[in-house]
Image (cartoon, grey):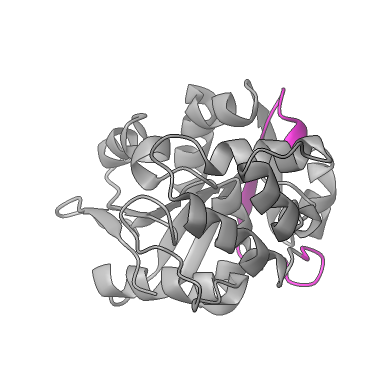
Amino acid sequence: MPLAIHHLPSPGSAHPPVVLLHGFASSAAEDYLATGWAESLAAAGRTVIAVDLPGHGGSPSVDADTRATTSAVVAAILEAISAAVPEGPFDVVGYSLGARLAWELPAASPRVRRVVLGGLSPFEPFATVDPAELDAVLLGAEPSTPLVGMMAGMISAPGRDTESLARLIPGLASEPFAPQTAAPQVPALLVAGSGDPMTRGIEELAEALRQGALTHVPGDHRGALDSIEFRTAAIQFLA
């Protein structure tokens, strides 16, 4: 499962590179490259490795034979990072789905130095989505819950690889997010938007972290990622 990356070196930098992981039904370009994150990190002397998740951005589609489980996606992320930077420590900024995957990275690689996890839900949203119902809603049926309707709208938006994203949902749900069993053992900053209902209960995640901190920034689930407060807190924490 080779993933597309945007590798933006910072020549002469003595700092570890920063890996950026975007949210569901988005892309590295939409979440980070077009919003000023890359420029801000470059100004701080940081090399950027922005990863497109499977079925997103420039990465390959998720076909019917691909089992895109959480562990498989995490392994693919690490392979993409190693292809760009074969050795040495790196930091991670993940948002929403990217944060959920970033939560797993320190246990999978000793190279992870610090993580910033934004827009992270303490619950597994994909596990409550019935793939058959999702397919029916995509064909025009009424959703039984607002979550199913929201997911259908997200994956069918213009420019999205709808089939890939529909396959990714049950793949990730087959290994649901279980934060209490594998909390990162590296320094971690949790960031939640003050108006983001997806992060309700995030205090429980902060308690599970051995070296963790939690900060709130303005904005809803999308607005928080774009806030200057989030970006500033992340860069300061990674420094």
Q: Which residues are magenta?
A: 178-198
Extreme front residue here? 140
Helix, strand or loop: magenta stretch:
loop
Quadrant for residue 34, please give it.
Answer: top left
Residue 81 in the image: state x and y as whole percent.
35, 68
Q: Nearer the viewer, residue 60 or 112?
A: 60
Q: Is residue 112 above or below residue 55?
A: below
Count of labels shown?
0
Q: Is residue 196 magenta?
A: yes
Q: Quadrant of residue 153?
A: top right
Q: Position of residue 65 (x, y in %)?
A: 49, 79
Q: Position of residue 164 (x, y in %)?
A: 48, 59
Assess whether residue 25 is covered by the magenta stretch: no
Location of residue 34 with respect to 121 vertically, above or below: above
Outermost residue on the left side: it is 11
* Residue positioned 78% across, 51% down in the render: 122
Residue 119 visible somewhere in the drawing: no
Q: Is residue 220 left or right of residue 239?
A: right
Q: Quadrant of the N terminus?
A: bottom left
Query: Residue sitting at 73 percent across and 71 percent down?
Result: 182
- In terms of depth relative to the viewer, which is nearer, 113 or 191? 191
What residue is shown at x 58% (from left), y 56% (from top)? 166
Task: Report whether residue 126 is seen.
Answer: yes
> x and y percent of residue 7 in the render?
24, 55
Vertical relation: 71 (above or below) 234: below
Q: Nearer the viewer, residue 76 or 165?
A: 165
Find residue 173 and report its image quarter.
bottom right
Q: Kindly identify the residue that appears in the image at 54 percent across and 44 percent down.
A: 155
